[in-house]
Structure formats: C-alpha cells, structure tokens
C-alpha cells in the first residue's frame, strides 16, 4: 500500500520560511517524479513544484524564485524549502507522485499539511 506522509507545515509570519518533507513508502518510486501541489480555500489545487529522479524540475512560475524542491532517491523523500512566504501562500500542501514532471495526472497523493502565513 502506497503511503505519502507529509510533515513540516504550520504557522509562519510573512517573510518567513518553512520546510516541508514527504516520505513515500509502499512501492518503488525510482521511475516516478515526486512533488508538491497546494490548494487554498475556494481555489483549485495547483502545481507548486515537481522533481524527477534525475533532478529535473518543473516549478509554478510564481513560486520558482522563492521555493526550492529537492529529493533523496535512496530515502524516497521529497522536500520543499519555502522562503519569503506571503499570506497568499496559505494553503494545504499535498505531496504527490506522478510519472513525469510535465504530467497533469497524479498517481498518488498525500493527506496534506496546512501552511498558514499570517502575522
């Protein structure tokens, strides 16, 4: 059974930083891309960033200058370093596994972790 377990969410002030982590288990993810999506209240879920096994990345254009995705293939983990956070970054952040970094179909989802940016 595939499990994606996120951690690292919470409350942060505007301009602050957070690091999200996701640990995947239950199968081999060697041929999959791993990444993060987010969903704000009243909005559709959107791509944040995805990374291939080889390190190729796909970022949402509005976040690529502030967020950095990384991956540890040996541990099946993917992290998201978020800097210069803004109130509009408030959302539930979901870990995801998909075939390719350009795919729009996600094969597996985590349960989500809340990120709140507020003073």
Image (cartoon, rainbow, N blue to C red):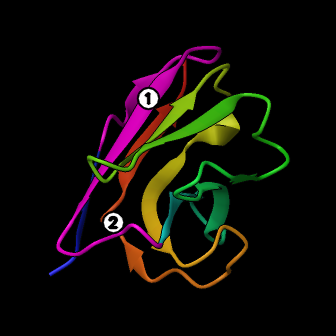
Residue 118 lies in what quarter of the image? top right
Q: Observer-nearest residue: 98 or 111?
A: 98
Which residue is disc 2 drawn over? 110
Q: CA distance from mark 2 to mark 1?
A: 16 Å
Horizontally, is 89 left or right of 64 in the view? left
Which quadrant of the figure has residue 45? bottom right
Q: Which residue is mark 1?
A: 19
Quarter of the image with the C terminus in it: top right
Location of the N terminus by quadrant is bottom left
The outermost residue toward the right is 61
Instruction: Say if 44 sits above or below 1 in the image.
Output: above
Estimate how packed mark 1 is, as few (under 14), some (14 to 19) or many (20 or more) residues with alpha carbons within 10 Å.
some
Judged from the image, the secondary structure of the residue bearing numbered disc 2 is loop
Q: Residue at the location (65% across, 72% down)?
A: 44
Q: Is residue 105 above or below residue 95?
A: below
Range covered by the magenta-colored residues: 7-31
Residue 113 is inside the magenta segment: no
């Amino acid at each position: 059974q595939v499990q994606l377990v996120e951690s690292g969410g919470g409350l942060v002030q505007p301009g602050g930083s957070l690091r999200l982590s996701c640990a995947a288990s239950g199968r081999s993810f060697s041929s999959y891309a791993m990444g993060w999506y987010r969903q704000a209240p009243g909005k559709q879920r959107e791509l944040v960033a995805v990374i291939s096994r080889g390190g190729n990345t796909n970022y949402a254009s509005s976040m690529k200058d502030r967020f950095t995705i990384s991956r540890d293939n040996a541990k099946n983990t993917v992290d998201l370093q978020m800097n210069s956070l803004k109130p509009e970054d408030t959302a539930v952040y979901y870990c995801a596994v998909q075939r390719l970094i350009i795919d729009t179909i996600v094969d597996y989802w985590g349960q989500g972790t809340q990120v709140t940016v507020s003073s």
